[in-house]
Image (cartoon, coloured by chain):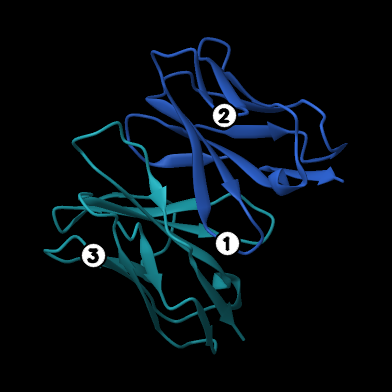
Chain colours: A cyan, B blue
Amino acid sequence: DAGVTQSPTHLIKTRGQQVTLRCSPKSGHDTVSWYQQALGQGPQFIFQYYEEEERQRGNFPDRFSGHQFPNYSSELNVNALLLGDSALYLCASSSTKSSGEQYFGPGTRLTVT
Amino acid sequence: KQEVTQIPAALSVPEGENLVLNCSFTDSAIYNLQWFRQDPGKGLTSLLLIQSSQREQTSGRLNASLDKSSGRSTLYIAASQPGDSATYLCAVQGGSEKLVFGKGTKLTVNP
């Protein structure tokens, strides 16, 4: 079992650009959540996808959007990047058929210059 | 709005010491509570999950307790080792299923 995987590991972008981050959930999981973690802070919930629909959203602007594919993998898109978007982006997967325990991937480090 | 607080923010102890990390939350209507470990620049590793109906969970040298009515959880680490050095994060999950995290406790275990 490969666990939760994310790509790329690191990314450097310029202000105003767009970025796409990818996540593959743990085998058997059907729900994917995305979190943003700024340096020295706890992760903040961005949104959650289940059955290819956004089920819940945190306090993030519409520049942040996502998608879930039929194989349960997911993408996070951020448009019009700001310096403040620099952070570690974490993907977590879980199963609606189990305890709700969330398993996290290694994260994507995004740097906006 | 759920808020999670972790005390202390940082902790430095000599190897072999037993230690306690604290987590408090403002809304007791939670579904479960998870403790995670995070190494610098890395993702989160789940350590223990406590369901709202449970009082504690144990895994090896780790023991986590939950007092839902008072909005508190503790993570007890026995016989600490330098390899335990990391940031420990507490997160609660309510009915909305999102996790709400504290800012973490940075633990350093000195040889």
* Side of A36 where A38 appears, left or right: right
Kindly identify which numbered label has been placed on residue A42: none
Task: Kindly identify which residue carries mark 1.
Answer: B42
**Residue at x 58% of width, y 73% of height:** A86
Cα separation, mark 2 vs mark 3, equals 33 Å
Cα separation, mark 2 vs mark 1, equals 23 Å
Q: Residues within 10 Å of mark 1 (few under 14, many from 20)?
A: some
Helix, strand or loop at mark 1: loop
Q: Residues within 10 Å of mark 3 (few under 14, many from 20)?
A: many
Q: Chain of mark 1?
A: B
**Residue at x 60% of width, y 41% of height:** B89
Helix, strand or loop at mark 3: loop
Quarter location, residue A2: bottom left
Between marks 2 and 1 in the image, the one whose residue lies nearer the viewer: 2
Q: Chain of mark 2?
A: B
* Side of B9 where B60 appears, left or right: left
Looking at the image, is B97 positioned above or below residue A34?
above
On the image, the x and y values in percent for residue A85 come to 54, 71
Helix, strand or loop at mark 2: loop
Residue B103 appears in view: no
On the image, the x and y values in percent for residue A73 come to 23, 64
Decide which of A84, A74 is in the foreground and name it: A74
Between marks 2 and 3 in the image, the one whose residue lies nearer the viewer: 2
Looking at the image, is A24 positioned above or below residue B49?
below
On the image, the x and y values in percent for residue A111 come to 58, 79
Cα separation, mark 3 vs mark 1, equals 21 Å
Tell me the kind of residue under disc 3.
Ser
Tell me the kind of residue under disc 1.
Lys
Task: Kindly identify which residue carries mark 3.
Answer: A73
Task: Kindly identify which residue carries mark 2.
Answer: B60
